Each structure stands twice: as C-alpha cells, then as structure tokens.
Image: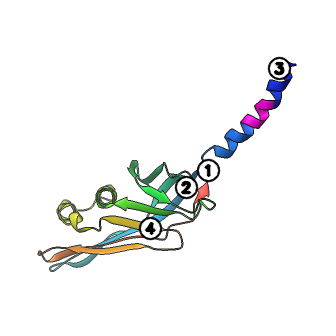
Amino acid sequence: MRYLKLLSIVPIFVVALNSEARSFYKATFKINVQYANIVDGTVDLLSELKVKLRYSDDHDFCEVVVGDAAFKCHSYHPDDHPENVMVTMDRGVGAQIVATALNQNKCVPGIQASFARLATYLDDTIDVEWQGDDFYQQIHDDKPESFHVWFYDMTQGVKY
C-alpha cells in the first residue's frame, strides 16, 4: 500500500521538474567592420560575418560564438517568449568579439593594433535584438583613422 502511494507521487514530481527545466536557444547576428584612414580611404574588413548566439530561457547562460571562441553575454526576453531575445555585451566583450573576428579573417596587423587602441571608445554596453535595435558606432580619436562597427540582423531564437 505504501509503495502504491509513492508510485502515485512520482509522476507528479516528474511533471513538476519538467515544467521548471530550462531550455536552450540559438540565433545568429551579423557583424560588419569598416576601417577608414586619410591615406587609403574606406576598407571593408568584415562584411556580413555571421556569428552564433546561444542562450537559455532562464537568463543564466548566454554566449556569442565567433569561430571556436565563445564570449559571455547577457540575454533578456519576455518570460513567455524566449525566442524574442535581446543581447547585451559590455565594451570589453564587444571589443574581443570584433578583434577575434578580425584576427580569424586575417586582418592586417597594423589595422588590428589600431582597433585595439580605439576599442576603448566603444559604448559601455552593446545591445542587439531580434526585430529591434541593431548596434552601430564609429570609433576614432585624434589620429586620422576610424572604425565603423555594426552588430545587426539578429535572427529569432530557435529552441534546440
């Protein structure tokens, strides 16, 4: 008799655990980077480079993947619509993402050094979201060169 009561409780417990289990989602967005200087004009360094985004519906896991490198981010979305994601990265992470993408696409070392110097001028937070805000910023200092950085066209999250 005691075992029958226990067996009747087990399915309820399993259902309760399944309703609280977190799910994982994936999406992508694109990166464009242009470099401009007074001698050479404007050069496309990255054009429509697609990067991966992986996140959980409980907001505890979020990463941007560029090649083999993964970078921590923060995801926000309505609790009942985790596919409608917004991602936030701080300046340092955004700079690392761009620097990694430039390195993987064999950017000229002098241009990489310029980006490393100018990356400190990126916004404190970088936001990109599905059907919402894209990120664009031009960064420069007193030298006659600049970078134009876009994170855009995020896809809707898909459960996996």
- Majority SS type along the magenta span: helix
Within 10 Å of the Cα at label 3, are there few (<14), some (14-19), or many (20+) other Cα atoms? few
The CA span between labels 4 and 1 is: 21 Å
- Residue 46 left/right relative to 79: left
Q: Is residue 3 visible?
A: yes
Q: Do labels 4 and 2 touch, CB within 8 Å?
A: no
Q: Quadrant of residue 26?
A: bottom right
The CA span between labels 4 and 3 is: 53 Å
Q: Which is nearer the N-term, disc 4 or disc 2?
A: 2
| Mark in front: 4 vs 2 | 4
Q: Which mark is residue 26?
A: 2
| Residue tagged 3 | 3
Residue type at mark 4: give it.
Answer: Val
Residue 126, image x and y in percent? Answer: 36, 66
Q: Do labels 4 and 3 touch, CB within 8 Å?
A: no
Q: Which mark is residue 128?
A: 4
Residue sitting at x 50%, y 67%: 154
The CA span between labels 1 and 3 is: 37 Å
| Residue tagged 1 | 160
